[in-house]
DNA sequence: CCTATGGTTCAACTATTATCGAACTATGAT
DNA sequence: ATCATAGTTCGATAATAGTTGAACCATAGG
């Protein structure tokens, strides 16, 4: 049995710039990050992921962002709460997130 | 006969964020951009592109950056001079380049 | 004009990434 | 316990991106 409840997240110091840039270089993922900039959201409430998109695809997009260190995905009740790792990103790449979100 | 002397560059207003982020999400291309942040360089002098890398590969990497609007590639004599489009990028996505280069 | 240099383009191949259905897992509610 | 909900994981396939050699193009210099 694998602990799928706790998904792996990179530590702050292990977040790599190229991975972050790649994760943000997709319209759908970028839209999700914009939505999360307003505060944490349950995955099911993330309209930016698309209504008629299969959940396996949504899960994959979220995974890319999570593995890059852009968001956290925590189990809360029956849902997964997604949170933008704002302080980690700001600490590691000052100004980057602001510039991306401001654009 | 195709005008390969003048390669297409997107206008400032046509530079898209996701394309820029994608172009920068590759280590080799990012290294080139870092090198160009010190000023324009002829392609042949861009050590960041790798010494034993075939020219077709170098040309391709440069093309991705050019088509994304990150650099210009101008024919100067027998060489191609690469220039970081700093003012265009700053105008379009304030703070982005600084954040990426500063990281 | 001829040649060398620096680079582009093309075509084929490889590798990575995206999409999606199906099966499975975890939690909450009845 | 059963069931519905929310999501992950797996495996297959499609789409996109990277690498490279060979052929071609443009300019500088003899």
Image: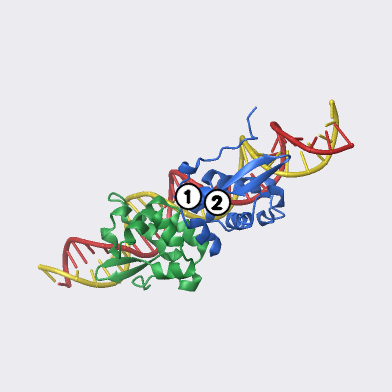
Chain colours: A green, B blue, C yellow, D red
Earlier-in-chain disc, 1 versus 2: 2
Left or right of B88 in this view: B47 = right
Locate residue B90, reporting x and y percent: 50, 52
Q: Nearer the viewer, residue B4 or D21?
A: B4
Task: Find the distance from the CA under tag 1 to the CA under tag 2.
Answer: 8 Å
Taking the spot 30% from the left edge, 64% from the top edge, the residue there is A39
Residue A38 appearing in the image? yes
Left or right of B5 in this view: A51 = left
Query: Which residue in the structure is indicated by mark 2?
Result: B86
Label 2: how many Cα within 10 Å (few below 14, some 14–19, many 20+): some
Q: Which mark is residue B91?
A: 1
Q: Nearer the viewer, residue B24 or A51?
A: B24
- Chain of the residue on which disc 2 is drawn: B
Q: Quadrant of residue A44?
A: bottom left
Q: Nearer the viewer, residue A27 or B52?
A: A27
Taking the spot 53% from the left edge, 46% from the top edge, the residue there is B69
Which quadrant, please, contains the N terminus of chain B? top right
Q: Which mark is residue A103?
A: none
């Amino acid at each position: 049995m694998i602990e799928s409840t706790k998904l792996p997240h990179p530590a702050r110091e292990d977040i790599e710039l190229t991975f972050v840039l790649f994760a943000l270089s997709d319209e759908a993922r970028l839209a999700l990050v914009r939505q999360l900039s307003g505060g944490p959201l349950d995955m099911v409430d993330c309209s930016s992921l698309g209504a008629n998109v299969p959940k396996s695809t949504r899960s994959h997009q979220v995974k890319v962002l999570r593995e890059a260190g852009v968001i956290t995905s925590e189990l809360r009740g029956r849902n997964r709460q997604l949170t933008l790792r704002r302080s980690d990103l700001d600490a590691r790449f000052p100004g980057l997130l602001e510039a991306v979100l401001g654009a």
